[in-house]
Image: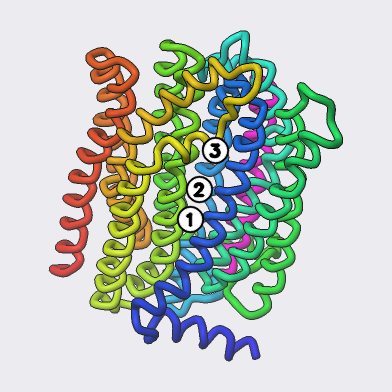
Amino acid sequence: MAATNQNDKRELFENTPVPRALASMAVPTIISQLINLVYNMVDAFFIGRTGNSYMMAATTLTLTLVLMSVAFSNLFGIGGGSLVARLMGARRDDEARCVSAFSFYGAAAIALTYSLFLGLFLDPVLYLFGASSATIGYAREYALLVIVIGGLPSILSASMAHLLRNVGCARQASVGLSSGGVLNMILDPLFMFVLLPPGFEVFGAALATLLSNVFACCYLLHAFRGASKTSALSLRFSDARRIGRRNLKSLLAVGVPSAVLTGLFDVANIFLNVLASAHSDLVLAGMGIVMKVERVPNAINLGVCQGMLPIVAYNYSSGNRERMRETIRTARWYGLAVAGVSIVLFQLLASPLTGLFLSTSSENADTALQTLGYAVLFLRIRSLASPVQFLNYHTSYCMQAMGDGKGTILHAVVRELVFYIPFMYLLDGLLGAGGLAAALPVGEACGAAFALMLLHRRLNRDKTA
């Protein structure tokens, strides 16, 4: 039975028509990305019902810390998952099991380290990220529950989902992440408006997210254990200790750049928050609303890229370059189509979409209306980045799938430090808050041009090798 299941996975990677294989891997991933996104946005949605712009600004500050945990999960989830897929393509399943076990325990170790660091230095970090006297209290209580206490289940869940996906178990990964999202949608209003008194809405949202992450982690641990019986996965600590130096180096060669890629994106968000808060807390809150709305097409396109990665990695390792290239091309067209539709919708529906996240019927109506005015402007400007933003994701995932850690990290550094952050300061200084929003499409366009050049050179080098 185990052999049959493993052969089915190989058939998917090797012979199933590319559009169908990509759909099989990407659709469950997209669903879990969207549900995961919804349950991250649910906190902001219900906090917005209070009409309190300072609570909204606080969740914007903590979003950077949440995304930093994604960077750590990528270190072992994408680094280990990509290597597992390549080892499967080379028919080295025993080594793949050692890599998956090492990735699991590595993710747990880095999660505990991150939580301990933030537990010791939480307030200084939040002030560094742009917190003010009006937002620090809300930001502190949210970060304490979701990241300091909840860091382990959050990072482990994301890492296990990546590993499951890379052995062909995309459905199990999707169900695990989605179940936590559904639970959070139920618990959020219960804690915020029923069980806890007024003024504790941020605490209630954080508690709901913590419990949902714990539930998702338990489910994914059960799914991981079950999948280990029929795939190249393992939870044995003895397997983790057997990882060879070559495989450890290969894991880190992709995992570190992937973590740096996400980490530099978070660093860029820190600069964005600091510059926005320098205008006012309302500008920061408006930018925070936009960053949640624009994550919808980004989540879909990340699902496309994460579904693509195992197929590209497997066929790269097995030597089937034509199938690898077809997968890359197909995923690129899917993502660009999603990005094009999102631009049209955001231009037409900017006002009602941003209005979902902040009530204007409360006693804070004046500040809420100002915040939404900023949000509408920022969304219409930043949405123009969707196609080039996808090309950055797509190219980075292609290079990770091929084990090109140097190309991935070079792209990340140039994209964020050479283009995006300098454009923030330049355009903010020239055009104010609107210029700050315009830095995204300008910076992402430059980053995408650089990324496509790197990928083109990599593919040509493989062709002539």
Q: Secondary structure at mark 2?
A: helix
Within 10 Å of the Cα at label 3, are there few (<14), some (14-19), or many (20+) other Cα atoms?
A: some
Name the side, left or right, on which 88 lies relative to 32: left
Residue assigned mark 2: 75
- Identified by mark 2, the residue type is Leu
Mark closer to the chain start, 2 or 3: 2
Mark 2 and mark 3 residues within 8 Å of each other at the beta carbon: no
Label 3 to label 1, Cα distance in Å?
A: 33 Å
- Tell me: residue 147, above or below residue 276: below
Closer to the camera, 329 or 168? 329
- Tell me: residue 210, above or below residue 245: above
Within 10 Å of the Cα at label 2, are there few (<14), some (14-19), or many (20+) other Cα atoms?
A: many
Residue assigned mark 1: 78
Name the side, left or right, on which 110 lies relative to 322: right
Question: Quadrant location of residue 175?
Answer: bottom right
Which label is found at residue 356?
Answer: 3
Mark 3 and mark 1 residues within 8 Å of each other at the beta carbon: no
Label 2 to label 3, Cα distance in Å?
A: 34 Å
Question: Quadrant location of residue 322?
Answer: bottom left
- Tell me the magenta residue range: 97-121
Nearer mark to the viewer, of 2 and 3: 3
Please give the count of numbered marks on the rendered protein.
3
Q: Main secondary structure of the magenta part?
A: helix
Q: Assess whether residue 72 is covered by the magenta stretch.
A: no
Q: Assess whether residue 104 is covered by the magenta stretch.
A: yes
Q: Position of residue 460 (x, y in %)?
A: 15, 63
Q: Position of residue 105 (x, y in %)?
A: 65, 53
